[in-house]
Image: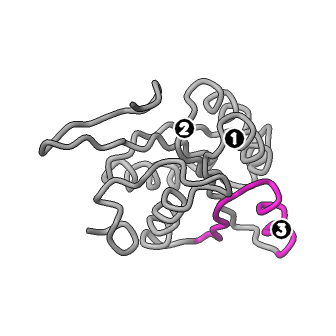
């Protein structure tokens, strides 16, 4: 039996759990690009442009994956990751940032981010990070078993 918030798609006589992914990014073009890539792979995407809005969506929607920028209006990405980890463990989180440093990498790890992804990143790097986060989950175990289309190298069949 699946959890009540999971979306199931039937096809070819099998059921596939569709990942619900929250993308938090204040830059509209990057947000749109990330959504398009994930929708092509079958994700249901939720979006937020601020950390405060993201926290509300985490509480209301309980996503399977959180992808968040580090620097956001209202609340930063570290707080978003911490909240996601408390509100719906073992949700994996990818922290993306153009402001990379050893300190921000350490803080991301301490906050519970599964993956730290420096900007700019390629389509392949982004999809690989998503695949890895869903497969690895968190220290408590995978959040969602990746559907068959995620099992190829870097998310390609």
Residue 63 — which label? 2
Which of 138/32 is in front? 138
Q: Residues within 10 Å of mark 2 (few under 14, many from 20)?
A: many
Which of 52/65 is in front? 65
Q: Residue at x 35, y 61 (%)?
A: 150
Residue 106 — which label? 3
Q: For the image shown, how many numbered marks are present on the structure? A: 3
Residue denoted by label 1:
84
Q: Is residue 18 above or below residue 115?
A: above
Q: Residue at x 78, y 51 (%)?
A: 78
Q: CA distance from mark 2 to mark 1?
A: 9 Å
Tell me the element at label 1: helix
CB-based contact (under 8 Å), mark 3 and mark 1: no
Q: Residue at x 67, y 31 (%)?
A: 53
Q: Quadrant of the N terminus?
A: top left
Q: Earlier in the sequence, mark 2 or mark 1?
A: 2
Q: Residues within 10 Å of mark 1 (few under 14, many from 20)?
A: many
Q: Is residue 100 magenta?
A: no
Task: Work out which residue is located at the far right of the displayed protein and give it.
Answer: 103
Query: In x, y percent, where is residue 45?
Result: 45, 40
Q: CA distance from mark 2 to mark 3?
A: 24 Å
Q: Is residue 152 left or right of residue 124?
A: left
Q: CA distance from mark 3 to mark 1?
A: 18 Å
CB-based contact (under 8 Å), mark 2 and mark 1: yes
Task: Work out which residue is located at the far front of the displayed protein and give it.
Answer: 1
Which of 39/150 is in front? 150
Question: In the rendered structure, which segment of residues is drawn in magenta?
Answer: 102-120
Q: Is residue 84 above or below residue 62?
A: below
Query: In x, y percent, where is residue 99?
Result: 76, 68
Query: In x, y percent, where is residue 24?
Result: 61, 45
């Amino acid at each position: 039996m699946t959890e009540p918030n999971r979306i199931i798609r039937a096809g070819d006589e099998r059921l596939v759990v569709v990942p619900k992914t929250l993308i938090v990014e204040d830059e509209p073009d990057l947000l749109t690009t990330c959504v398009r890539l994930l929708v092509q792979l079958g994700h249901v995407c939720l979006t937020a442009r601020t950390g405060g809005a993201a926290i509300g969506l985490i509480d209301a929607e309980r996503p399977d994956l959180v992808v968040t920028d580090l620097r956001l209006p209202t609340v930063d990405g570290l707080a978003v990751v911490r909240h996601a980890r408390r509100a719906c463990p073992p949700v994996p989180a990818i922290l993306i940032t153009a402001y990379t440093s050893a300190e921000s990498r350490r803080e991301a790890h301490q906050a519970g981010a599964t993956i730290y992804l420096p900007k700019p990143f390629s389509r392949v790097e982004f999809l690989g990070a998503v695949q890895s986060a869903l497969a690895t989950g968190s220290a408590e175990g995978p959040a969602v078993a990746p559907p068959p289309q995620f099992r190829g190298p870097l998310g390609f069949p």
